[in-house]
Each structure stands twice: as C-alpha cells, then as structure tokens.
Image: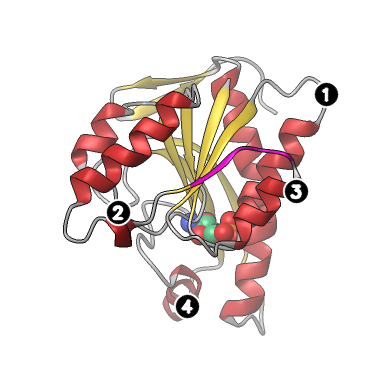
Amino acid sequence: LKLGVLISGRGSNLQALIDACAAPGFPAEIALVLSNKADAFGLERAAAAGIAIAVVSHRDYPGDKPAFEAAMDVRLREAGVELVCLAGFMRLLSPWFVGRWQDALINIHPSLLPSFKGLDTHERALATGVRFHGCTVHHVRPAMDDGPIIAQAAVPVLPGDDAHRLADRVLEAEHKLYPHAVRLIAEGRARVDGDLVRIDGPAP
Ligand code: GRF
C-alpha cells in the first residue's frame, strides 16, 4: 500500500512509519512525505531515508484553502498515494479534501478519543484527573479529531507526572500504534462500516 505522510514539524511518528516500512514484509511503503512547512524536521528524516518529499505551504495560498488543498491533492495523486496518514499535520482539512480521500485518510491523535479532542491533551488529561490516557488512530471526518476509530493504546497516568513526562509516555505508544494501524489497513483487516471500523482476524 502506498502511503502519503502529511507533516508540519518534528516527524517522530513519520520516523516510526519509515522504520516500520523498512522492515521486511511490512505491507506498505511511503511514496511521499508532504509538509506545509519548509523547515519541518520531518523532511530531513524523509530525505535521509531516500523518500520523496514535497512542500506545499499554506502561506503561498493566503485565504485560499481550496487552492492549498488542491495543490496537496495533486502531489499525492501524482505520487500514486493510496492512503494519506496525518502525522502531526497542523492544518484542519476541509470537507472537500476529506471527501476526496474518504476512508483513505487517517490521523493519529494523542488522547483516547472521544476524550480530549484538540490541542494540549496531556495538560487537560492531568487537569481532569484521568488515570489512563493514550492515543488513537482514526479515519478522518470533517469535524476535528472525529471519525471511525481504527486502533488505540492506553498508558497509565502516574503520580508525579507533568505534561512533559506524560507526553513522552504517550508518544512511545504512538510510535507503536501508527504502524500497527497502517498494517491493519494494508492487510485489509480494518473495514469501515458506518461510524465504526470492524477488525478482522486475530488480535495482535
Ligand atoms: C503527535 O503527538 C501526534 O499525535 C499529534 O502531533 C504530534 C506530532 O508529533 N497529532 P511528531 O511530529 O510525529 O513527532
């Protein structure tokens, strides 16, 4: 399965996908890494791995989100991308783009959805006092951090945690979860059925 990975920054989840795809027998490859920021560190990770990169800056399309998204869409299609993976991509995508990639566009979010949509999830988890936190890979729908859940991983909130320590623990889980979710899709074992994803086959 050909992946397009959309990033805006650090790209540690991108790195996890790069590493997973390099393993023998992994059923996906990264055809393109696309960033809306020219200085995203993730672009260096992709280049180091010999993966094609592209920058489509939203700043080149002031006030024209359709043109920005159309430019991204063209790059992804030219690269033969079959599944778009958002990995720290910080622009909200329009219903047009989401519809273009219906059920072929996934995101990783640092919380156990539907709790803590949006930003600052670790601070909010601590402020709420939940004892478990985690991450979710889900199909993208037009509403932010909404859509059929493919996979989740939980981590404990421990005494003495601050947002930084908790974020590190969640990030470690993210780096395992994203390749796992991509594998499920690439193997045809995660089927969208209405608002849900049905998983076929044995548990991991
Ligand atoms: C991750 O926590 C991801 O869940 C969220 O943004 C962060 C991106 O980190 N959507 P990285 O760029 O993958 O290192």
Label 2 or label 3, whichever lies nearer to me, is 3
Reading the chain from its start, which is encountered first: label 2 or label 3? 3
How many marks overall? 4
Q: Earlier in the sequence, mark 3 or mark 4?
A: 3
Q: Quadrant of residue 42?
A: bottom right
Q: Nearer the viewer, residue 47 or 140?
A: 47
Helix, strand or loop under label 4: helix
Can you identify the residue that label 3 sits on? Answer: 48
SS assignment at label 1: loop
- Residue 159's tag is none
Which mark identifies residue 92? 2
Work out whether mark 1 precedes mark 2 in sequence or the reverse, and give the earlier one: 1
Which of labels 4 and 1 is toward the front?
1
The amino acid type, in three-letter code, at marker 4 is: Glu
Q: Which mark is residue 24?
A: 1
Tell me the SS state at disc 2. Answer: loop
Say which label, 4 or 1, has the lower sequence index. Answer: 1
Q: Is residue 30 left or right of residue 50?
A: left
Tell me: is circle 4 under 8 Å from ligand 1.
Answer: no
Label 1 crowding class (10 Å Cα cut-off): few <14, some 14-19, many 20+? few
Measuring 20% from the left and 36% from the top, which residue is drawn there?
Answer: 96
Question: Quick one: SS at disc 3?
Answer: helix
The residue tagged 4 is: 123
On-image quarter of the C terminus = top right
Q: Which residues are magenta?
A: 50-54
Q: Nearer the viewer, residue 78 or 135?
A: 78
Queried whether the magenta region covers residue 183, the answer comes back as no
Q: Position of residue 162 (x, y in %)?
A: 60, 83
Q: Residues within 10 Å of mark 4 (few under 14, many from 20)?
A: some
Comparing 180 with 64, the one in front is 64
Q: What's the CA distance linking mark 2 and mark 3?
A: 28 Å
Considering only order in the chain, which callout, 1 or 3, is on the residue closer to the N terminus?
1
